[in-house]
Image (spheres, rainbow, N blue to C red):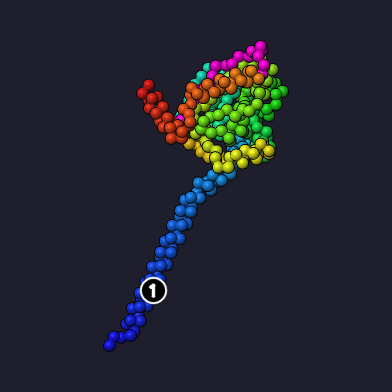
């Protein structure tokens, strides 16, 4: 006769193993659920955190500028050649037509506004280095409301976009840059590179009043360097139109090939109206986009162009 204790212990062991198996399986599924949820949420979290990180970096830059002014008095300090070469290797930025920016005398520079105008900083640096001139710029009104942003505004000579202020800068013989599309073009444009200028003619009125030429500027692949989140863009635009608060998240910093093209100056013509001048500039900008930008824009292609251009440069 079989021992009953044997059967009871055997059945207990089988039940224990079954329970352990179920627990292990449950833990595995829970782990997979958490893992996949984290992977799916990571891009969303990164997108939401990026504006905060970018704002923090802007404030760090402002603090650095204040310290720079205090210790170096804005002169007597230069970057070493090695740091310049490292920056060039990282960016591989090119500029075509720099000779179209005059070495003296006023001009109004009109440029296409990407999600982040990093091309503007590179153009400004090249103008200072090679044309021995600086360029003032028109900034959106919200910039002047950002706390502790005054150091950056002063450093980059950013001014509010009133016609009188802009005309005064040009009449003094300085260079002034403006993006007619402004925040709308920056945040609500896309890979087809539309001009979102609306009915803005103020830049043409400024040029006509100051009797200065207008120089169109466009940077290839600027919309592939940084992107704006497309989800909910219509709703965010309606919020912007009613509040003028730019809430669209920006992400990117991709190593694309950036090449800035500076067009021939559109000379002052007293025989035409500011409206006609604005149309002439817009048509020229559209032609530059058509000539220098593959449409629609592609992130993979623009990154590849960075390396193909380097290969061509080494061959030459």
Q: Main secondary structure of the magenta part?
A: loop
* Secondary structure at numbered mark 1: helix
Q: Quadrant of residue 149?
A: top right
Q: Nearer the viewer, residue 32 or 136?
A: 32
User: Which quadrant: the C terminus?
Assistant: top left
> Residue 134, percent across and down?
60, 23
> Residue 240, percent across and down?
65, 38
Please say if 213 is above or below 249.
Answer: above
> Residue 122, percent across and down?
53, 28
Q: Quadrant of residue 165?
A: top right
Q: Is residue 61 magenta?
A: no
The furthest residue to the left: 1
For the question of whether residue 315 can be seen, the reply is: yes
Q: Quadrant of residue 28?
A: bottom left
Identity of the residue drawn at 45% across and 32% down: 302
For the question of whether residue 57 can be seen, the reply is: no
Tag 1 residue: 16
Q: Is residue 262 magenta?
A: yes
The furthest residue to the front: 234
User: Which quadrant: the N terminus?
Assistant: bottom left
> Residue 121, percent across and down?
56, 29
The furthest residue to the top: 271
Number of numbered discs overlaid on the protein picture:
1
Q: Nearer the viewer, residue 73 or 61?
A: 61
**134 relative position to 16: left or right:** right
Highlighted magenta segment, given as a residue range: 257-274
Q: Nearer the viewer, residue 46 or 301?
A: 301
Identity of the residue drawn at 45% across and 55% down: 35
Identity of the residue drawn at 46% across and 53% down: 36
């Amino acid at each position: 006769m079989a021992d009953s204790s044997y059967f009871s212990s055997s059945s207990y062991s089988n039940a224990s193993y079954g329970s352990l198996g179920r627990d292990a399986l449950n833990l595995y599924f829970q782990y997979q659920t958490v893992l996949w949820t984290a992977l799916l949420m990571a891009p969303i979290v990164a997108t939401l955190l990026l504006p905060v990180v970018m704002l923090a970096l802007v404030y760090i830059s402002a603090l650095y500028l204040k310290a720079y002014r205090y210790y170096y008095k804005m002169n007597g300090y230069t970057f070493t050649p090695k740091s310049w070469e490292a920056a060039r290797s990282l960016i591989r930025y090119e500029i075509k037509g720099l000779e179209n920016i005059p070495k003296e005398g006023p001009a109004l520079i009109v440029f296409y506004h990407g999600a982040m105008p990093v091309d503007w900083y590179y153009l400004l640096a090249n103008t200072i280095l090679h044309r021995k001139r600086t360029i003032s710029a028109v900034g959106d009104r919200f910039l002047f409301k950002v706390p502790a942003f005054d150091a950056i505004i002063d450093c980059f000579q950013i001014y509010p976009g009133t016609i009188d202020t802009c005309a005064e800068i040009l009449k003094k013989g300085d260079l002034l840059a403006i993006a007619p599309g402004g925040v709308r073009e920056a945040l609500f444009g896309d890979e087809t590179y539309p001009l979102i200028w609306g009915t803005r003619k103020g830049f043409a009125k400024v040029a006509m009043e100051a009797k200065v030429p207008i120089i169109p500027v466009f940077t290839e692949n600027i919309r592939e360097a940084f992107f704006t989140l497309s989800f909910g863009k219509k709703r965010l635009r309606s919020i912007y139109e009613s509040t003028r608060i730019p809430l669209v998240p920006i992400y990117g910093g991709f190593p694309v090939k950036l090449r800035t093209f500076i067009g021939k100056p559109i000379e002052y013509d007293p025989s035409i109206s500011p409206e006609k001048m604005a149309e002439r500039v817009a048509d020229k900008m559209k032609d530059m986009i058509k000539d220098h930008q593959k449409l629609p824009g592609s992130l993979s292609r623009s990154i590849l162009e960075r390396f193909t251009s380097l290969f061509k440069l080494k061959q030459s």
